Amino acid sequence: MRRRLSLLATAFVVVAAVLPVPAAGASAGNGSPAPPGSGGIAWAPCEEEPTAECGKLAVPIDWSKPDGPTIDLAVARRKATDPAARVGSLVINPGGPGGSGVEAAYGAPGFFTEELQRRFDIVGFDPRGVGRSHPVVCSASVYNQMPPAVMTSQADFDRWTAYAKRLRQDCRARTGPLYDHVDSTNVARDMDALRAALGEEKLTYYGISYGTLIGQMYAELFPHRIRAMALDSNMDHSLGVKAFLDTEAAAVEDAFDEFAGWCAQEPSCALHGQDVRAVWERLLAKARSGKLYYPGVPDRPMTELQVLWQGVLGTEGPAWQLLSEMLRALDGGGPLPPWVPPLPGRQPVEGELAHLPTVILCEDYNLRVRNYKQYAALLRSSNRRAPDMRYNPMPIEDLPVCLNHPTTNPQHRLRYRGTAPIMLGSSLHDPSTPYGWSANVARQLGPKAVLLTYEGWGHRIYGKEECATVPFDQYLISLVVPAPGTRCPVGGGSRSLLKQRQSELWRTDNLHWGVRF
């Protein structure tokens, strides 16, 4: 899956099914790897971003065999701008699975406040199986045979079951032994090795979306090595497949409702004065009939699932104005917006290899479904919760890939035995990691967690408002947590915290739960 995500609004942009990054094992910079356990990283200016430093960290493929074969993790950092005020290293992860922490570090100046940059070396790494850190790869020829994501019969289910097995065998052969060891507990162990290599006695961490699962697993494995852990827009690793899909469907429907309500009230909405839901239904029907084409993609019609992707991508920022212009254009009612996002969803890839970070999700979440009858029941349940959106296309697109896939880090309630308080954050209207997920994680952590609620929209809250940003900074820098039950209203602070204000964001990839920082 891609990238140059506009992380921080513009610094990373991730693009469609395959990551245009160096091949497996390629370097992100000039740094040479430190031997495993040596506790150091050889830093050098990054080839792609010379204002940052890059290096490599060798970690075992299998942590149960610490002296066995290793891989190199790609690491990047931006040093604290005020060495005299430096607190330490802040390790960051932008989500995914498949998000590049290296590119997150590249984009840090456009995302984090000047005060946070002044006080921390900001360090990102590509997790094992991702990007520059020995990515999970498959033959493009096999990947491109992927059946349509949404199944409509037992024959479809049987076809997917056979294909998922063949894809898994191919990707495992192409990737090598690492394929079986890319779950988030392994990434958490890697992160502890990174903490030690950075010379930090305890970890200071900020993760978004799927990056919160890495943080949660770290808290379980290394509860007494946490200095501060800020988890923004949380995954809930306690949910079975039905609860997982139901909550995702309800969240994306809620986000669509908010968009429709905005259009009804806001004259600048390109669909103002129209029935937004009627426009939406027309587009879905046209896609089902094979007569809807995406701008710039004349060779194949849009699928219904790709229309649904518009509803997710347009509400993650949120990018309501752009979404309204895209829907108007697709409905034949007006000009295209100045910038047209790439066609979303999984698509055929070019070249010899395809990247498949979805394997990480398959190893973290048991999403197995017995047969088409159970699958159809799951879809009906999602449809009841999402009459407009039907379901959230992200997990629906991933679920078939994970059919019968071994799960090495299955769902469970969090078990955190540490004493350091953990800070959580979430917006009320997040289409991708529902507010209820963060609230449930807070309940599992009990008095050791504080949840900051942003009463607005979108995926990720840091940087959206002053009152949703300053508490993170205060916690990470001074270990001061917000009061329990703290809520941040829309418009909660007018001070410009960032040099470059983050504009509307539209995820340009199919990076699941990735961010846009």
Image (cartoon, rainbow, N blue to C red):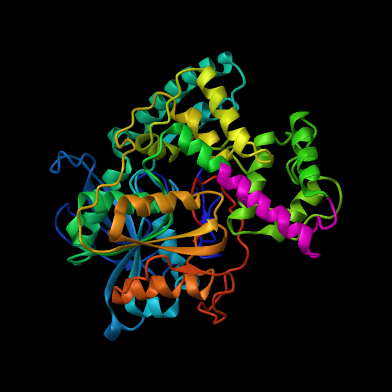
Number of marks drawn: 0
Residue 403: image x %, image y %? Answer: 44, 25
Residue closer to the observer: 401 or 469: 469
As drawn, 395 above or below 38: above
**Residue 39 visible within the image:** yes
Q: Is residue 292 left or right of residue 512?
A: right
Report the side of 306 relative to 332 (left or right). Answer: left
Instruction: Find residue 9 and report its image quarter.
Output: bottom right
Q: In this view, does 312 lie above or below 203?
A: above
Kindly identify the residue that appears in the image at 77 percent across and 64 percent down. Answer: 266
Q: Position of residue 508 (x, y in %)?
A: 59, 52
Residue 287's quadrant in the figure? top right
Q: Does the magenta stretch include residue 258?
A: yes
Residue drawn 35% across and 28% down?
A: 173
* Visible residue check, residue 149: no
Is 141 inside the magenta-drawn segment?
A: no
Query: Horizontal and vertical percent for residue 404?
Result: 40, 23
Q: In the figure, 222 relative to 226: above or below?
A: above
Q: Would you say the magenta stretch is mainly helix, strand or loop?
A: helix
Q: Give the magenta-colored segment's residue range.
A: 250-274
| Residue 146, percent from left and from top | 55, 27
